[in-house]
Image (cartoon, rainbow, N blue to C red):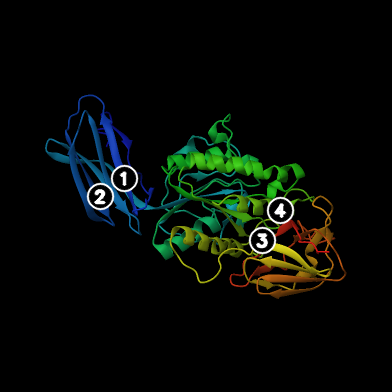
Amino acid sequence: MSLFAQKIRITEAPEDYQLYARDSSNTAEVLISGNIKGTPDFKEFSLKVFKDNVLYNTQKDSLVDKKFSVSTEINSGLHEYRFEFYIKKNNVDSLYFSADHVVCGDAYIITGQSNSHASSSLSTYSNPYCRSFGGVKTGYETYNDDDRKVRWGGMATGNLEGLDGVGGWFKKNPFAVGAWGGMELMRLIVEKHQVPVCIINGGSGSSSIEKNMLYPEQPSLETSFGRLAYRVDQAGLKDKIKAIFWHQGESNSVSVESYQGYAANFDVLLNDWKRVYTSLEKVYLFQIHPGCGRNPESYLSEMREVQNKIDKKYEMVNIMSTLGVTGHDGCHFSYDGYLEFAKRIYPLVARDYYNEKFDFTITPPKLLSANYTGSKKIILNFDQSILLEEKREVNGVVHYLKDQFFASEDSNSEQMPLEVKRVDVKDNSLILTLKKASNYKFITYLPSKFYVGTRDIYNGPWLSGRENNIGALSFDRRSITQLKD
């Protein structure tokens, strides 16, 4: 290569381990182009393409105005391609450039705060068709020169060297995608649909939505948004991202101002995502679990309701519940819990991008309406058949689902525990039989953060979907249809 380096300038070419995003025809174009500085000492060039080490395509051409350009199509699937670019000098073909282990598939982004990018020492799965790009930097400092040198890697990872358990919140970790969204979600897609996948994870531990937004006045590598966009751009995928997985909100549940400003900030963030990632079609949003947040005072219930409203407002946003996921430690989850994240979100992705059909409901239960049917009975109607967990023991105390409903006379007044005598389920409806007559106007499901009267973070019992066991989305201050005179 050094023999020709002073004369030949490559302007576009594949890199080792690169993923090219497939188009609607299940292919991607790979281009090799460049120009010659000075007087060329060759005229002809050729490209050999190998598919799984078998010669797949050969092209030959000549320089035009000291420029060369040759392209070929590769197919999606569990195949690796090698490209060999030759120049012909003195009637001899000499290898000038090569790139190996190139694949064609789909590209996604994961971002948010710590639960978006958790690593685990138990995440040992690897697959040559699960790819990522660049070094994950989950702190808030800018990229340095060494960070920029980390480009395509052989295989993505959900692990972190030296990690024992779950963590890695503020560690540099090249090609890291997280245990759930990266490795397990990629595994399901690659193994079930035979499509290579690249996920680029830009999560930043403890970050607020404001920390994840674009600030044009700041150099891009000083912000979480900018570092992620830089990596996606360098990977050649800026206009190829199918969807973003967004797990964030705990850090915005600490004050009234923070949660009340969230919807407007999300609107700005979504518009910036769509402007920067021009092919973006979907955002998969996770409704956060009770717990986490830096202050004992919490507005997590209100924050979860904001997330419900975001899901309802934007057609491209699909919400997924984290309620009832196993292994919650008060803020993060066990490895099995993160695997459950992937298990829950995968069907939505498979439905939207891989034409997979399911014979069961794949979305979390959503409240449709709340109605009095008498002064002592409230019926909550959901969009699917629901399952009731009557009670659960946590830290030696038995907690009952009937005690996890709250009500108020108006939308701004303090919510009081709803005195429920009995809870029954009938198909899509949850029937609350009250201890005494009431005429509340608003109802909430689940405490904000703690069991009432304790400092124990809420961890069940739960309502869930009967067909899918996904926790029902919590709701805050939903209107109850009032009794008629």
Q: Which residue is mark 4?
A: 292
Q: Distance between the Cα atoms at labels 1 and 2?
A: 10 Å
Q: Secondary structure at mark 2?
A: strand
Mark sitting earlier along the chain (4/2): 2
Q: Secondary structure at mark 1?
A: strand
Q: Which three-letter amino acid code belongs to the residue tagged 2?
A: Val
Q: Which residue is mark 2?
A: 49
Q: Which three-letter amino acid code belongs to the residue tagged 1?
A: Val
Task: Estimate the x, y position of residue 241 in percent, counting from the top left.
Answer: 46, 47
Toward the viewer: 355 or 448? Answer: 355
Left or right: 304 as drawn, with respect to 150:
right
Q: Distance between the Cα atoms at labels 4 and 2?
A: 51 Å
Q: Which residue is mark 3?
A: 473
Q: Of the residues tagged 1 and 4, which is closer to the observer? A: 1
Residue 400 visible to an observer of this rendering: no
Q: Which three-letter amino acid code belongs to the residue tagged 3?
A: Leu
Find residue 279 and report its image quarter. Answer: top left
Residue at coordinates 21% horizontally, 41% vertically from top-left? Answer: 86
